[in-house]
Image (cartoon, grey):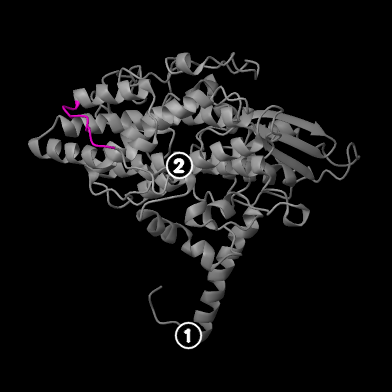
Amino acid sequence: MSEAWSAAERESRVFDEYAAYESLSLETEDHRWAFGTGFADPLAGVDTTVPHGVDPAALAATCLGLADDALIYSHRLQQWVTRAPELEEETALANIALDLLGQARMLLTRAGQAAGWFVPTGSGGDGRDEDRLAFFRDEREFRNVRLVERADADFAELTTRLLIFSAWRLALLQALTADKDPVLAAISAKAVKELAYHREYAAGWVIRLGDGTDLSHAKTQAALDTVWPLTGELDLSEETDAFLDAVFARACLTRPCSPPLGPVAGKTGRDGTHTEAMGYILAELQSVARAHPDATW
Amino acid sequence: MVTAAAAAFGGADPPEPPRKSSAGSGGSDPPEPPRKIAESVPDPELPMVTVADLGILRDVSEDGDAVTITITPTYSGCPAMREIAADLRRRLERAGYRHVDIRMSLSPPWTTDWITPEGRRKLAAAGISPPAATSTATPPTAETTPATPPTAETTSATPPVTFVPLTLVRTPVTCPRCGSRDTLETARFSATACKALYKCRACLEPFEHVKEF
């Protein structure tokens, strides 16, 4: 097929290529371009009423914070794809990022429902769905903690931060499995099972690296020292603290005593004040959607 | 008429499907019951098993030519859910059901314990080691009411999320090829969110294992 084609043949070939794509979308009867695209409401058919006694604004704020943590951290983890030291680790990180993205989608949707953003534009709401919330909010509208914004300097930093993040989030969502809002409780119940795997994966690596060679130990301790000030915003529970101490002990790591990164003018990530890294993430995350605001995928 | 087996060949154009013009209209074969059609839909990532085998299909109800199907997601971000929903809709519409509503149900959460014995047999026959029972399994027949929520303090000590020890409880994995239990996990995560990579030290073959979840 590598012989030169006549103009007519080329034309027919071009036509055939379009026809091939067309038949793909015809066959599936919806116009998606790849596996897993063509996203529908991830909570389709779930009873989305906010129960009596639950403050919709507080529920929306809780969901939005947890959604943004997952969305931004998922993006940071995705940046390791094609850069991880081994294929198996890359697959693991992609899977963890995918779990978090799934959590983010459901939580953004729930936040939108609780806040009334999903009401169509003509009827009082601003019509924002999960995609609008992810791609068309500005930096100060994001409510993620600052821990998730930082780019990892190396693999030790990746695994150390993943350990702290997943241990913290696991405890947070475990408590929310008993939330008064049944949708948030159900999202949390799914997420804790995923986070248990994430935390175990990260703990395994932190122990392996911390209790490894002199070089891996030094790098992991340095990573922990770097990441630790960002935990000030997390309000770690006693159990999470105890868990982290157990991992640090087995990893021969010293828990840093460095002071936490303080708020800026009284505000932290949950208030919409972020580190310098946040602008770069959003530029990468949002630029395509903003350049083609009416595109669908 | 399109049989479940013929419908399973999703790639090729099936023969002209029967149209359900109106309920009980004479002359043509009656359409297949929607449950039978829904149950035959293969999982896009594990095509050797159906959505019924995996326990993803929660409910099918029919009212005239309207069908409501309830499915439950496996992992939060599993991209296959979208494909499953599209596949269910397509097959039912081809069979003549004009109003197909696909609903998500999040509670009780799906666990690998919902995979049927038949599903496990099919996975093993395809060289994929099926999951062992999870410690806090929700039996597939359980009512959707979750247990009384414990307080935050006691919650953190409830399995499967244990804060110490550091590793999740694991049962030995049997090689689906030779049956040996002398197997080794080579990676916790695999090509899909639901599987881990193993290798058998007896027959030396690598294989995939559906993680207990």
Residue B140, magenta (yes or no): no
Where does the C terminus of chain B fall, quadrant-wise?
A: top left
Name the chain letter of the residue that bears numbered label 2: A
Q: Which mark, by number, is residue A271?
A: none
- Answer whether residue B134 is visible to the viewer in this image: yes
Q: Main secondary structure of the magenta part?
A: loop
Callout 2 secondary element: helix
Indicate the amino acid at tag 2. Ala
Look at the picture and state if A12 lies above or below A186.
below
The span picked out in magenta is A251-259
Look at the picture and state if B147 lies above or below A113.
above
Residue shown at 81%/46% (left/top)? Answer: B19
User: Which residue is at the front of the view, A219 or B179?
Assistant: A219
Q: Is residue A126 left or right of residue B162?
A: right
Q: Position of residue A59 (x, y in %)?
A: 60, 35
Name the chain letter of the residue that bears numbered label 1: A
User: Which residue is at the front of the view, A183 or A204?
Assistant: A183
Q: Position of residue B99 (x, y in %)?
A: 79, 43
Q: Position of residue A151 (x, y in %)?
A: 31, 50
User: Which residue is at the front of the view, B57 or A166?
Assistant: A166
Name the residue carrying label 2.
A70
Where does the N terminus of chain B fall, quadrant-wise?
A: top right
Q: Mark 1 or mark 2, which is nearer to you?
A: 2
User: Which sits earlier in the primary sequence, circle 1 or circle 2?
Assistant: 1
Q: Quadrant of residue B161?
A: top left
Look at the picture and state if A12 lies above or below B143.
below
Indicate the amino acid at tag 1. Ser
Residue shown at 43%/16% (left/top)? Answer: B159
Name the residue carrying label 1.
A6
Q: Is residue A5 left or right of residue B8?
A: left
Look at the picture and state if A124 lies above or below A43.
below
